[in-house]
Image (spheres, rainbow, N blue to C red):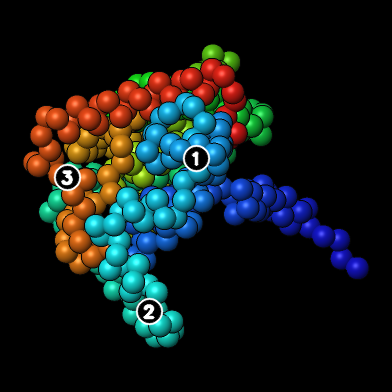
């Protein structure tokens, strides 16, 4: 009987957290009410149920005897009546009647019809993503951001042990452990300061910080390679600077990833948000694949300076990506998400244009004041909940 290779046990152990997370999300994370109402067939019952679940998570007391409803008493801290399907239907009666009746009379589609519907929906989403309204200020900058960040971070993290060997560091595994551990402060910083300073500032600052760490890293490696040519070895100070810069890059890179995930979801309208995330993620994967090919070429043909060149190329990629947030439409931090930025008579959830989400050109001053008021109400509500009861995360 052959012994089970230890690497198989290690791979299986690494898969357990992902399986646990998938199970917890499936069983405990409610779907967004916005998703149910923005779907082609609005599901008011599930949307109302999701609203009530989220209200309870925010410690809003639901009282069946109250007259005020959750829908009509937004940000009201008193006990409110649970939201019902009929109330949601009444609130959207202008555009819900046709969709509700059609969903009652619709026959179950065949597999071929489902496939055609999926293909048409995907093509329509791509058409919207690359339209003149989203391409220059949202889709293209975000794709470039994902490409640059993936190119640099995946290129460095997958080659970090090779880089440590190339520059002849001691205690490679311990230094790799410190490199991985530095993700923890990055997660904490992004969690605490993302809403306070805004997505754009956090993303630009973290990208520049990661690039700066790589530049100092590359400079130290280049100085060490010249000492090796003179017959000298790396000093303890050079080793300390190298490990510190590597950890700083990892911490800032983690902040960048957390922020780019949030900003990507916030920038795309609801009806193309999933498609936008998919396109950006695919673009990032291309950057990660390309970095492996380029880094391997630099190591082989670097003539002793391949490690420094890898770091320089990655830092250039990060600096280029740091300019992309400046091109984005606007910072959506603590703002109400957009439902339909692309208005079309055929692509609204209930076959008509939404009138409560206007484009920038159609937005007047009273509506801007209303959005600001809603944002302030949400912030005050969030602060009161956080001060009284802990969130269920």
Q: Is residue 272 above or below residue 217?
A: below
Check disc 1 and report its element: helix, strand or loop.
loop
Quick one: 2 or 191, which is closer to the camera?
Answer: 191
Taking 110 as reference, is 370 left or right? left
Residue under label 2, please give it.
106
**Do residues under tags 2 and 1 come within 8 Å of each other at their CB atoms?**
no
Closer to the camera: disc 2 or disc 3? 2
Residue under label 1, please give it.
81
Residue under label 3, please give it.
358
Q: Residues within 10 Å of mark 2 (few under 14, many from 20)?
A: few
Quadrant (top left/top right/bottom left/bottom right) for the N terminus: bottom right
Quadrant (top left/top right/bottom left/bottom right) for the C terminus: top right
For the point 46% across and 38% down, which residue is it? 67
For the point 17% across and 33% down, which residue is it? 367
Q: Earlier in the sequence, mark 2 or mark 1?
A: 1
Residue 90: give x, y in percent of width and height: 34, 53
Q: Earlier in the sequence, mark 1 or mark 3?
A: 1
Q: Is residue 366 above or below residue 109?
A: above
Q: Residues within 10 Å of mark 1 (few under 14, many from 20)?
A: some
For the point 16% across and 64% down, which residue is it? 345
Closer to the camera: disc 1 or disc 3? 1
Q: Is residue 233 above or below residue 138?
A: above
- Asked whether residue 241 appears in the rendered view, the answer is yes
**Do residues under tags 2 and 3 come within 8 Å of each other at their CB atoms?**
no
Tally the marks. 3
Mark seen at residue 59: none
């Amino acid at each position: 009987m052959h012994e089970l290779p230890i690497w198989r046990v290690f791979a299986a152990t690494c898969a357990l957290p992902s399986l646990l997370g998938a199970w917890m999300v499936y069983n405990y994370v409610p779907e967004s009410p916005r998703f149910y109402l923005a779907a082609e067939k609005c599901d008011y019952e599930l949307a109302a149920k999701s609203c009530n679940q989220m209200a309870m998570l925010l410690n809003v007391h639901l009282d069946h005897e109250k007259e005020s409803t959750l829908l009509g008493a937004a940000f009201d801290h008193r006990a409110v009546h649970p939201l019902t399907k009929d109330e949601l239907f009444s609130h959207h009666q202008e555009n819900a009647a046709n969709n509700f009746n059609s969903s009652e009379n619709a026959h179950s589609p065949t597999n071929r019809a489902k496939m055609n519907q999926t293909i048409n929906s995907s093509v329509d989403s791509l058409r919207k993503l690359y339209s003149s309204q989203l391409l220059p200020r949202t889709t293209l900058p975000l794709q470039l951001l994902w490409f640059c960040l993936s190119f640099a971070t995946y290129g460095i993290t997958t080659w970090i042990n090779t880089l440590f060997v190339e520059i002849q560091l001691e205690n490679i595994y311990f230094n790799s452990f410190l490199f991985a551990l530095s993700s923890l402060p990055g997660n904490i910083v992004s969690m605490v300061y993302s809403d306070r300073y805004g997505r754009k500032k956090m993303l630009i600052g973290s990208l520049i910080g990661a690039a700066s760490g790589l530049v100092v890293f590359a400079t130290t490696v280049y100085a060490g390679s010249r000492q090796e040519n003179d017959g000298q070895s790396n000093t303890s100070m050079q080793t300390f600077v190298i490990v510190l810069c590597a950890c700083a890059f990892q911490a800032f890179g983690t902040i960048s990833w957390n922020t780019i995930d949030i900003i990507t979801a916030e920038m795309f309208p609801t009806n193309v948000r999933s498609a936008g995330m998919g396109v950006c993620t695919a673009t990032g994967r291309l950057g990660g694949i390309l970095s492996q090919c380029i880094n391997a070429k630099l190591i082989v043909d670097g003539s002793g300076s391949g490690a420094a060149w890898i770091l320089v190329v990655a830092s250039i990629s990060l600096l280029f990506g740091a300019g992309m947030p400046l091109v984005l439409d606007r910072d959506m931090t603590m703002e109400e998400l957009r439902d339909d930025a692309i208005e079309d008579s055929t692509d609204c959830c209930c076959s008509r244009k939404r009138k409560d989400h206007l484009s920038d050109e159609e937005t007047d001053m009273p509506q801007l004041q209303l959005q600001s008021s809603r944002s302030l109400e949400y912030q005050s509500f969030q602060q009161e909940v956080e001060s009284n009861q802990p969130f269920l995360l």
